[in-house]
Amino acid sequence: MVATVEQIVQAALALPVRDRERVIEELASSCATNEMEPLSAEWHAKIQRRSAEIDAGTVTCIPWAEVQAGLRKGE
């Protein structure tokens, strides 16, 4: 029997946090390839700027759960 993506996600969500983190790490590392293009100078600058804003406390971060909920609602 081949599990569906939804079945796999539900099984992963039932795992303890540390095990879920390991699943995330394993999946993320399996997606990283040498075929990925390097970041452009513009993207690198944007990442540096946003990171500095977070460090300085000049922006408010939105928790991932709220972002997900908004995406599901189509916001």
Image (cartoon, rainbow, N blue to C red):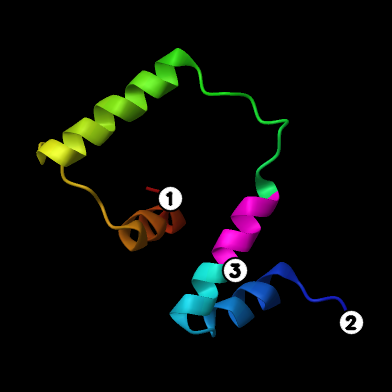
Q: Position of residue 57 (x, y in %)?
A: 10, 41
Judging depth in this view, the residue of 34 and 71 nearest the camera is 34
Judged left or right of residue 45, residue 61 is left
SS class, disc 1? loop
Please say if the residues under marks 2 and 1 sit with CB atoms less than 8 Å apart: no
Left or right: where 70 falls relative to 52: right
First along the sequence among labels 2 and 1: 2
Pointer 2 residue: 1
**Distance between the alpha carbons at the discs numbered 2 and 3:** 21 Å
Which amino acid type is marked by label 2? Answer: Met
Mark 1: give few (<14), some (14-19) or many (20+) Cα within 10 Å: few
Looking at the rendering, the stretch of residues picked out in magenta corresponds to 23-30
Q: Which residue is mark 1?
A: 74
Q: Amino acid at mark 1?
A: Gly
Q: In which quadrant of the rendered view does residue 34 lie?
A: top right
Residue at image mark 3: 23
| Residue 65, image x, y percentages | 35, 63
Residue visible at 44% across and 14% down in the picture: 41
Q: Main secondary structure of the magenta part?
A: helix
